[in-house]
Image (cartoon, rainbow, N blue to C red):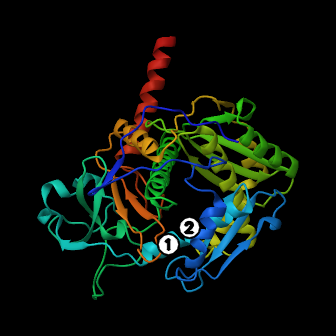
Amino acid sequence: MTDSPTSPQAEPGIRLGDAVHRAAKRFFLGTHRTATPEETLARIAPHLGRCGITRLADVTGLDRLGIHTVLGHRPNSPTLSGSAGKGFSLAAATVSAAMEAIEFHHAETIRLPYVEASWNDLPADARIPVERLPGTKNGSFRADRPEFWAWGWDLMNNRMVAAPWASVALLGNPVARPGLRSFYAMGTNGLASGNHVLEAIASALYEVIERDSAACWRYAAQALGWPTPRVDLSTVDSPVVQDLLRRFDEAGICPLLFDLTADMGVPTYLSIVYDRDVRKSGMHRGYGTHLEPAVAMSRALTESVQSRLVLIAGSRDDFFRRDLQRNQNADGAAEVAAMESQPATADARRFTNQSTPTFEGDITRLLAALRRGGVEQVLVFDLTQEEMGIPVVRVVVPGLEGYGFDFYTPGARPVAFANALATHAATQAGAAS
């Protein structure tokens, strides 16, 4: 079991519009939830067909690790037809895969209010600063040209703020009209679901922080040749993570764990796994972020297993030939030797458990961490559809980095992060001389 969460003073609820929400946690095995996986599965099962889900396939047996992995299939999806989920039980993995597919359906059938206007014409207190607009770098945005905007709730300033429609939805624009275009590269960053709206918001916040932290460390490695801190696995003291590492060892799979925690201080990890004896089977990655470090580590490790099984199953429709070749060639003898040669100097006990017994407590702490990172707006878009009642949200955090899409150009945060690392290193070198 994971460590018990800390017990801070009671947090005020989280305000969304005119309503204030609170949600206590009830489940703590490898994740934090307001309900058990079995309860969640029973609740969502009647709505799978409405979301286009035709099959939830247990593919755990295709690998030798025995960590539960399930694939979800939506053959008529206008975007991705496959989803994936992992967990410490078959029910947990099934829920994980199903909820990912449900999130996609909600983002494809979005029902939010919108406005067509130029950025200049939006109210000054209801817009994202131009330099922090989430969009394609060097894209087609012009402040005087009309775009479609969706209205969301800013958790930091308690007011409605407009974000690019395509940063919220997964499909086109809110009206069918020839010639429409967007300056935003669509993705699923910050799209999350849960048993309660606050559970969904917390999951979304973890994801956007995770992607930003990964982008910061990736840029530092590319721009400075800075090594990402590798975790010394002998310092892991969580029974759950220790059990995962034992399973890897028994299956002949080597895990490497890296500490990607950035300036916001929310524990974030990257797991890379490869086959101990068989080359050209690929390097498989997984990421995890959570206020409880053990949960972040276990998420990263189990997601790398999920990535491995998705490739083995061969059903992911956004995994192209170039991706397959790149992955299969990533675990050559030279590549493995280079990764293993990096000293494991990061202590897995570096962070204490900062989670709370409630989701309003966790969200309050995550908002404080984002403020430390210079974030001034956190926008929540409630995508929940009344007839299903499954909470789904999209969270957009202006200023944070997202996916490393093709043609991605680093924004201000990765550059500042790398500069801070270089400055700190120079200061230490000067003090030592």
Q: Quadrant of residue 176?
A: bottom left
Q: Between 368 and 165, which is closer to the camera in this rendering?
A: 368
Determine whether the residue tagged by mark 1 lies in a helix, strand or loop.
Answer: helix
Q: Is residue 163 visible?
A: yes
Measure how far apart labels 1 and 2 are at the Cα level.
6 Å
| Residue shown at the point (57%, 52%) measured from the top left | 33
Tell me, yes or no, whether the two marked residues, 1 and 2, touch with CB atoms within 8 Å: yes
Residue 202 position (above or below residue 75): above
Percent coordinates x, y for residue 155 in the rendering: 31, 50
| Residue shown at the point (49%, 41%) measured from the top left | 220
Percent coordinates x, y for residue 274 in the rendering: 76, 52
Residue at the spot of label 2: 100
Percent coordinates x, y for residue 234 in the rendering: 75, 31
Percent coordinates x, y for residue 8 in the rendering: 47, 32
Q: Between 175 and 425, which is closer to the camera in this rendering?
A: 175
Q: In this view, does 336 lie to the left or right of 388?
A: right
Residue 267 position (above or below residue 402): above
